Image (cartoon, grey):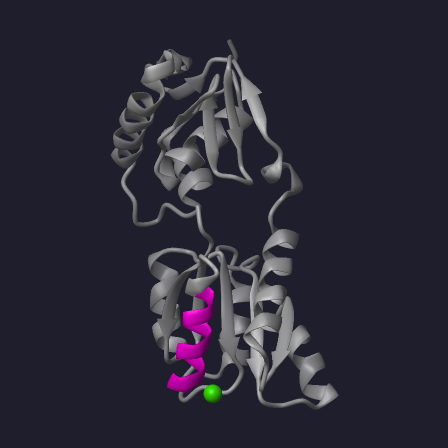
Amino acid sequence: MNARILIVEDEPAIRELVAVNLRHAGYTVIEAETAEAARAWIDAGLPDLVLLDWMLPGQSGVDLARQLRAQPRTAKLPIVMLTARAQEGDRLQGFDVGADDYVTKPFSPRELLARIRALLRRTAPQAEADPIEIAGLRLEPETLRVYAGEQVLELSPTEFRLLHFFMKNPDRVLSRARLLDNVWGDHVYIEERTVDVHIRRLRLALAPGGHDRLIETVRGGGYRFLPR
Ligand code: CA
């Protein structure tokens, strides 16, 4: 369940350095050289955070940030601006266009990572980190583990997120559209039957402890996670 980070930076050396460090820290990294390329990635699926260079050929990073903030779909996308400019006025302008944080080049990868972690923590609701226990099933967001009693269950990242959302909403009928919104984050390009495929896999993963029975299909409604 690694966060996806989009790096928008036209200087290959810096982009590569950042990408290597982020991957090493366990993040999934997408790279774009221009604002236009970044836009295409964002349209195809929302990342968890954008590292955005201020000065880009073509549309500038500042412009892209402003554009992202103006659209409901991307208004809350966490943005860290990267820039070579250190003047206080530019810094303020960076926050003004809606950047959540601001890192001045040259920066150390360690500093950048610390800022990214802090921002991801700030933007993720606190309850996301709390373990949940229902009907003998225990899900731990911090270790990404699910236990059926003592046994650790094998779940893919998507099935983990799906189960997490179910366990946060026990006994509620959850439509496929709602599941897509909350588990995939953004369902513009995903079909609703994708949900059924992952429900099937999740049930299989839960079967060893008999917990597959907790996921109920609600005809015409979607799915429900039984609280007991
Ligand atoms: Ca640049």
Is residue 110 rendered to the left or right of residue 177? right
Pinpoint residue 214: horizontal percent, then vertical percent: 42, 14
Q: Quadrant of residue 183?
A: top left
Front position in the image: 216 or 206: 206
Query: Is 103 located above or below residue 131 in the figure?
Result: below
Front position in the image: 110 or 115: 110
- Bounds of the magenta segment: 11-22
Q: Is residue 220 visible?
A: no
Main structural element of the magenta stretch: helix, strand or loop?
helix
Query: Is 81 located above or below residue 144 in the figure?
Result: below
- Taking the view exactly as shown, the residue that stands out farthest to the top is 228
Pinpoint residue 171: horizontal percent, then vertical percent: 51, 15
Is residue 174 rendered to the left or right of residue 119? left
Is 18 a magenta residue?
yes
Counting labels gives 0
Is 119 a magenta residue?
no
Residue found 66% across the figure and 53% down from its top: 122
Pinpoint residue 139: horizontal percent, then vertical percent: 51, 28
Q: Is residue 203 visible?
A: yes
Pinpoint residue 179: horizontal percent, then vertical percent: 42, 33
Is residue 8 rendered to the left or right of residue 198? right
Residue found 42% across the figure and 33% down from its top: 162
Q: Quadrant of residue 225?
A: top left
Query: Is 40 located above or below residue 131 in the figure?
Result: below
Q: Where is the N terminus found, in terms of image quarters?
A: top left
Q: Quadrant of residue 23?
A: bottom left
Query: Is 27 located above or below residue 92 in the figure?
Result: above
- Taking the view exactly as shown, the residue that stands out farthest to the front is 150
Front position in the image: 144 or 51: 144
